[in-house]
Amino acid sequence: MAIADKVISVLTNAIYISTVPFLLCAVVTFLVTTLIWRRLTYWSKYTWPPGPRGWPLVGNSLLIAPNSGQTNANITRIGKQYHPDMFTLTLYLGKKVLILNSYKAIKDGLIRQSELISNRPPDWPFKYINKNRKSVGIFFESYTNSWKREKKYMMRTVRHFGYGTSAAQPLIHREANHLVELIKKRNGQPCFLGNPVSLCFLNVTFSMIFSATYEEDDREFSKILNIIRNWFTPIFNMYDVEPLLPFLHRFGLGSRLKQGKRNTEDLLGFIKNHIDRHRVTLDPDNPRDMLDECLIEMAKGDPNSDLSRGFKEENLQWMLVFFILDQGDTTTGLFLFLILATAFHAEVQQRVFQEIQDVIGDRPPSQNDKEKMPYTEAVILETLRMDTNFWLWIAHFTAADVDVLGYKIPKDTSVIPNIYSVHFDPELWGDPEDFRPERFIDEQGRISKPEYLIPFSIGRRRCIGEQLAMKEFFLFYITLLQNFKFKLSESDPKPKLEAKFLEVFPEDYRVVAEPRE
Ligand code: HEM
């Protein structure tokens, strides 16, 4: 009996010992096969345009990293080697991104498929620096009903405070004259215009939003300006390899993100101080500015309002963040490019000045003068065409499987419209590298703006600040040229008249602003 038990026990053990590895092997084989099968069916279901081969783990991230020495032209050219209209980039861990690399592709993606390619990617580093890891604010939120209401409200408000000529024009005049005074203080010596231009553009926005203005030597303003200048890079950079180390973010580490988090908290704190002060002095019957209007609308709690009950102070803060960032960075950067182009091309400057003399003389410019000043407008449009710089930051995200120019792209893919590829397409412009405002003037001497000039993007995510920025450019530019003749500083190396990679500001340059008689 004892022997029989022993034999049974030995046999049972033997079966157990050989079964466990067998079962384990079977489970692993099953899982691997399922995974491979799912990958294969996944890949066979979708078709991607070709693109450059990436490195293991980091893909093409290094190719397009900020400070990689890369240029917009080079990235566009690399893409064209693979496909005339679009290409695929691989980021870390094999994540694929579709780059729309021609007007044809951008139109197909952002107009024909606008309902499906208007979300925002959830994996921007932004998510790690924000409280609750939530995407908030018009730019970062996906295309939902509450986002639609918020955007509608913001557009209406911008129109009310900024687009309505009567509201914005006096503010812009005041700040354009303020800028003239600040430049005069430089006594015709070579100087950087970045800070005074930012100050005066931001003062227009601060006046519209909080009825506040700042001076150049104000410490609070200097701090905010420093934050604005350094805000975009750590937060929009989804090509960064830091996301490979997600545990770092969990502990708030990762130097760039840490910096981004600090900047964001300071900027939100600055806005919150203004909100708190406004709440104390709010008169619901007499709104003073945009912030008052928003607070009154929010207090109603009306579910039918565009600022519905779901709209909280956090949403308001983020809405204002984009007003401030876009004025202090995007609009200022483009205006600096406009001054640089003006200083570069004496003949262009002379023609604009002549047009000012013919139409306006010494009186303050008005928005109504624009239609009589096609050359001045053409110079502004040419600046917007040439200074196409931050396109790689602008990611959309697919809400479902989509078909772009015959390629089947899966749901949850980042799609990036390369606006630079459109603005520098030789087939559309002939000589895209040249600064030539005449391209926007037709044979009758009128402005002719082709549909493929898209500095503010197209589709559902189109910029809401276009009207305000265009109006500011026109009025600020004319006021400056009425007062100064701009030249490049002869004691400095000649700057390049080209958009920098992933940066809104042009190359740092000094100009000489000679006062006009
Ligand atoms: C010349 C100056 C400006 C240029 C070239 C510009 C360009 C752009 C571009 C290309 C986008 C991305 C659109 C997309 O995702 O497809 C955008 C978005 C946006 N811009 Fe501007 N912008 C400028 C000034 C402004 C100003 C002054 C404001 C503030 C009033 C503003 C507010 C916004 C907002 C809120 C978005 C996000 C829109 C959305 O996600 O639906 N921008 N801008």
Image (tube, helix red, strand yellow):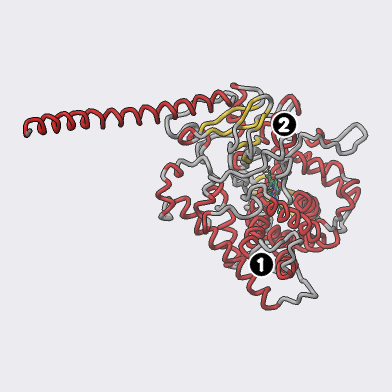
Q: Residues within 10 Å of mark 2 (few under 14, many from 20)?
A: some
Instruction: Pinpoint residue 217: horizontal percent, then vertical percent.
Output: 61, 66
As drawn, the residue found furthest toward the front would be 1
Point out the residue furthest to the left here.
2
Q: Nearer the viewer, residue 351 or 135?
A: 135
Q: Is residue 270 left or right of residue 336?
A: left
The circle drawn on residue 214 is: 1
Name the N-terminal-most of marks 2 and 1: 2
- Quarter of the rendering containing residue 308: bottom right
Circle 1 packing at 10 Å, graded few (<14), some (14-19), many (20+), is: some
Task: Measuring from the top left, give residue 438's x and y in whole percent.
Answer: 82, 34
Q: Could you tell me which residue is drawn at 77 percent across and 53 percent down?
A: 468
Label count reads 2
Residue indicated by mark 2: 108
Residue at horizontal 74 percent and vertical 24 percent from the top: 427
Tag in front: 2 or 1: 2
Q: From the viewer's perspective, is 353 left or right of 513?
A: right
Quadrant where the image shows the N terminus: top left
Element at label 1 = loop
Which residue: 79% across, 61% down? 161
Q: Please, is residue 294 above or below residue 359 in the view?
A: below
| Element class at badge 2 | helix
Q: Position of residue 170 (x, y in %)?
A: 82, 63
Q: CA distance from mark 2 to mark 1?
A: 44 Å
**Left or right: where 84 falls relative to 112:** left
Answer left or right for 506 relative to 471.
left
Q: Amino acid at mark 2?
A: Asp
Task: Identify the amino acid type marked 1.
Answer: Tyr
Q: Is residue 113 visible?
A: yes
